[in-house]
Amino acid sequence: MLVSVDMNGKSVEVEIRENREGLLEVKLEGKAYPVSARTLPEGGVSLMIHNESLTVYRTGETLYIGGTQYHVRADDPLKKELLQSSSFKASEGAVTAAMPGNVKKILADEGTAIEEGQGVVVLEAMKMENELEAPLSGTVKKIYVSEGQSVEAGALLFEIE
Amino acid sequence: MFKKILVANRGEIAVRVMRTIREMGIRTVTVFSEPDRVALHTLMADEAYPLGGITSAESYLRAEKIIEIARKSGAEAIHPGYGFLSENAEFAELCQKSGIVFIGPPPAAIRQMGDKVTSREIMTAAGVPVVPGFDKPDLTEADAVAFATKAGFPVMVKASAGGGGKGMRKVDNPENLGKALRAARSEALSSFGDDHVYLEKFVENPRHIEIQVFADNQGNVIYLGERDCSIQRRHQKVIEEAPSPFVTPEMRRKMGETAVQATRAANYRNAGTVEFLVDKNRNFYFLEMNTRLQVEHPVTEWITGLDLVSEQVRIAAGLPLSLQQEELQLKGHAIECRIYAEDPENNFMPSPGTVQRLSTPAGPGIRDDSGIYQGGEIPIYYDPMISKLSVFGPDRETAIRRMCRALSEYIVAGIKTNIGFHRKVLNHPEFINGNHDTTFVDQHLDELMHTPTGDEPLAIVAAAVCYYLDRKPTVGQGEVQKCSPWKHFQRSGWM
């Protein structure tokens, strides 16, 4: 099986083959790693790479190794190509919430002209205020939230065009 | 001794305080906001009372409601922890009037030390060195330029009621002074309701070193050595250690005696911390006095063998300190890492959410003061610190190695944390040599963010293998073993 793995903005291809004893042969950038793998309860996986024992844990696209988090995304290389070539793309002027929080203040009105870097929405979470700025100069097309509203991570806040 | 104490706080500090109170044979009472109905401190207390409300202002800051609960529950004393009402003189006064013991200093001491200008005046009068500064009512731009020219740039504009980096501006030349004064005043007014600002000479590349003091009602004042808190991000401490690698025994004695002098000058009782800025020539200047238990108190507990919360409770009950200065012996080295729910790669933005997986380190010389549990929520309304990991070793090098080992066992999944960031700081040569100052994180941020850990190829192999296992036909499932290494790391529970 071919797997495409993205990490730190770089993409690599990994080839995995299982032999008759159930051992995996993993090829990465010309190097071969013999791997024995066992899944553990609650998202854990025990790997033995060249007899080096490694326990990883994962949630979504985050892997935990020795207390450190790695953001890795594994996918079918063919599927990924399809996704990249499709025309769907979020608008450049759309700004979403990076984390859940409360809309503390709205600094600009819909339909008004705005400069790149000018604040539009102030989000508050965990005692910290974070001013979200217009990513480009233009007009405030739409503001999707109102003051006092709580928003989830990833929620669309406003759009500039 | 008290029979019942109310802990008016949440998170790790409420848990930590209740642990000692329980060991002392005293019943624990706590309060909780709506989102904290199943928070660790609520579950752990013997009695818990709802405050209602969601935000801090609607819940943990409601002084009268908390006092009413103390009365209703029969608690004779309130421990405020840190933050929230801990440095609120009106609250301490309200306790006094209601016949409830506030476990902390008298209201007057809180008030005086809470005002930076007043505390500077008291310290100057007591012969405690302070950073050269200038203050007068209605300070004008011309006054500021005159002082700054005499003292030398850069200078700091600071809010009298300030804290946490708010209402603070560094100014490098006379042209920017007027603007900085206006900005600091407006920020101070909106943050603290008071726009009074003053000037201070800027100490270049300072270390932040503080002295833990205790004063009882019998007139004894002692110092418990120093803590070095020079690793900071956004003016907040993230790693603390005791003793400081920068402090010589002679300097320790001098700083300690100065701190005791400051404590006496403030007419202080109970636990306090005298914070100093230390320049590269080992000159130290009074910065401020914190009138409460500090977040980083465990490092002092490690090297002194004392339980600071127990000392606080004893003093509040009218008992003398459990030891004299001459009896105090400092031993070994301790380091603390504050574990925050935050994203170091995204300007340390808070990262609230559900703790999907939690494995905490164990073994020799390790202590984890945590306020969370697996499956629990970290609400968006409060401080993002989830735990304090501290270690002890016979010397600094062993303590650093032990902390690295402990961090490698620490897994918090579902939210972002600064655990990986801590590992990088602890492995940095400048930290290992002990040459760092408060500018360390800003100076080395890029390097700390982008240095590979060396485990990256393993992460790629692991991700690919996980992907493969997810899609593999289920024939091999019989092989999956039932043993779990996570069980091995499991928390022992809080009951």
Image (cartoon, coloured by chain):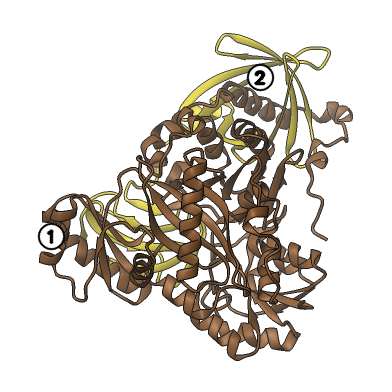
Residue B454's spot in the image, x, y percent?
56, 22
Residue at 55% x, 29% y is A79
Q: Quadrant of residue B150?
A: bottom left
Which of discs 1 and 2 lies nearer the camera? The answer is 1
Foreground residue among A49 and B151: B151
Determine if marks 1 and 2 fall on one subunit: no
Up-down relation of residue B430 to residue B121 (above or below)? above
Q: Secondary structure at mark 2?
A: loop
The mark tally for this picture is: 2
- Image disc number at residue A1: 2
Q: Amino acid at mark 1?
A: Val
Q: CA distance from mark 1 to mark 2?
A: 71 Å
Foreground residue among A49 and B82: B82
Task: Bin the neighbour count of mark 1 within 10 Å (Cα to Cα): few under 14, some 14-19, many 20 and up.
Answer: many
Residue B197's spot in the image, x, y percent?
27, 69
Foreground residue among B313 and B20: B313
Quarter containing the N terminus of chain B: bottom right
- Image disc number at residue B145: 1
Q: Quadrant of residue B455?
A: top right
| Chain letter, yellow | A
Q: Secondary structure at mark 1?
A: helix
- What residue occupies the far front of the structure in this picture? B326
Q: Is residue B464 left or right of residue B159?
A: right
- Image disc number at residue B58: none
Residue A129's spot in the image, x, y percent?
40, 61
Q: Is residue B165 left or right of residue A45?
A: left
Task: Bin the neighbour count of mark 2 within 10 Å (Cα to Cα): few under 14, some 14-19, many 20 and up.
Answer: few
Residue at 60% x, 18% y is A14
| Chain letter, brown | B
One can see residue A112 in this view: no
